[in-house]
Amino acid sequence: MSFESLGLRPELLSAIAAQGYTVPTPVQTQAIPVIFEGCDLLAGAQTGTGKTAAFALPIVQRLSENIPREKRRKPRALVLVPTRELAAQVSEQMNNYARRLSLRSTMIYGGVTIQAQIERLHRGVDIVVATPGRLLDHAERGTVNLSRIEFLVLDEADRMLDLGFIDDIKQVAKYLPPKRQTLLFSATYSQSIKQLADELLDHPRRIEVARKQITADAVTQTVHEVARSRKREMLSFLIRQGGWNQVLVFARTRYGADKLTEELLLDGIKASAIHSNKSQSIRTRTLAEFKRGDLRVLVATDVAARGLDIERLPHVVNYDLPQVPEDYVHRIGRTGRAGEDGVALSLVCPEEKPLLVAIERLLTYAIPRQAIAEFPHVAAKRTVRVKEIKQADKVTKIRKMQDKQANTRAPAKGAAPRRGKPMTERPAPKTGRRGSRMK
């Protein structure tokens, strides 16, 4: 099947061709006709399957058939996503299609000033891509009018529930008209997802396009067993030995991500971290640098990395194994996308063996182990270098302190030597209880 056979307008076909796509993915082939029919949709689709275009293309085309003449348009399509990064990516793709058909799109998420978002909404938009919390804030303030929504999309609904957005989603739904088309996309079908679908969807058509294998066929998975204290050494060794130029590394905590980034920089490997403690502007700039190739390593936590869309990402490394087995699947799904091959490596210490067992139970197969014979000899050099750097820093600080003390004690050139304490440091004369009257 071709994109032309799906009934898309020429403007959208040219946008697709400009992106280099020629054949629709399975989720696009199945979802686009259902959306054109006007039916609610419950779709099982993993990240990297092309699901954004699956709902964006038909929604944009349907909206373009009846563009309001009013200058300040009210939103007619709403896409809810779990994270700011995913909001930015979905909005970018939606904009690419919408502007070709004279439609306006904007994104709304927390962590940035709300005033700029209010101004954009006031000017009028057709499509809103938003995270639930910030959108609910706008709805309660009355700065967004959701009474004309024709399409509601819940993207990565399972992740939104994991992050605790269930109540926010239900509150947002109260501001929407009951007559609308609702599309729910989820990588997994938990009981919570089924309950949410029962509440929000009306006799939905159901499609399942997830691969039979839970992980992508194009991803080569390997486990390297290593002591926790030597993980960073092994990571640096693998990056250098393999000549890797673009690596996404997952750390379990924000502190761990920052610490690993510092250690990689000491190794001379250009790296940066993104996590929820970083401002949105920093996260956006860091991600852009990584995509351009200005950064060799991007260290991320699960929340920050969910939904990241990086074309042709060759390597993913689990520096720390995730506590939830399903997160392993999402992590390695960042690579091996759109027909490209990818490599996913996990550095596993003895304490993480139970986590590895849980992941392999989910996958229903054992991940191959691989030993690196030359690693212990090569990696030991780095420890010496760190000690040398720390010792050099300590010596430098001591010398600076000594120089500062010497400069404080030494009189200026040509000045008369000091005698006694300066006037400002002399103690005030004692006056006794009665002050100046005491003789």
Image: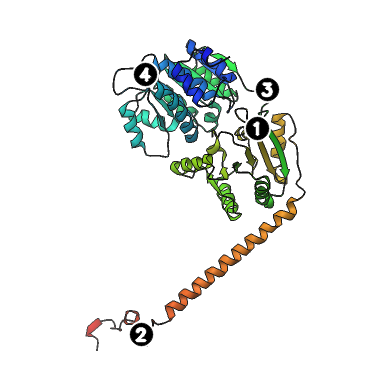
Q: Which residue is mark 1?
A: 341
Q: Mark 1 or 4, which is nearer the eye?
A: 1
The reply to whether discs 3 and 4 touch (Cβ–Cβ < 8 Å) is no
Q: Nearer the viewer, residue 339 or 392?
A: 339
The residue at the point 50 percent across, 71 percent down is: 400
| Location of residue 225 (image quadrant) | top right
Q: Which residue is mark 2?
A: 415
Q: Which residue is mark 3?
A: 212
Q: Can you see residue 3?
A: yes
Q: Please state which amino acid type lies under the numbered disc 4.
A: Arg
Does label 1 or label 4 sit earlier along the sequence? Answer: 4
The answer to whether residue 62 is above or below residue 216 is above
Q: Which residue is mark 4?
A: 148
SS of the residue at dot 1? Answer: loop
Left or right: residue 397 compared with residue 429 = right
- The picture places residue 19, in percent across and down from the top left corner, at 51, 27
Q: Nearer the viewer, residue 112 or 24?
A: 24
- The picture places residue 17, in percent across and down from the top left corner, at 51, 23
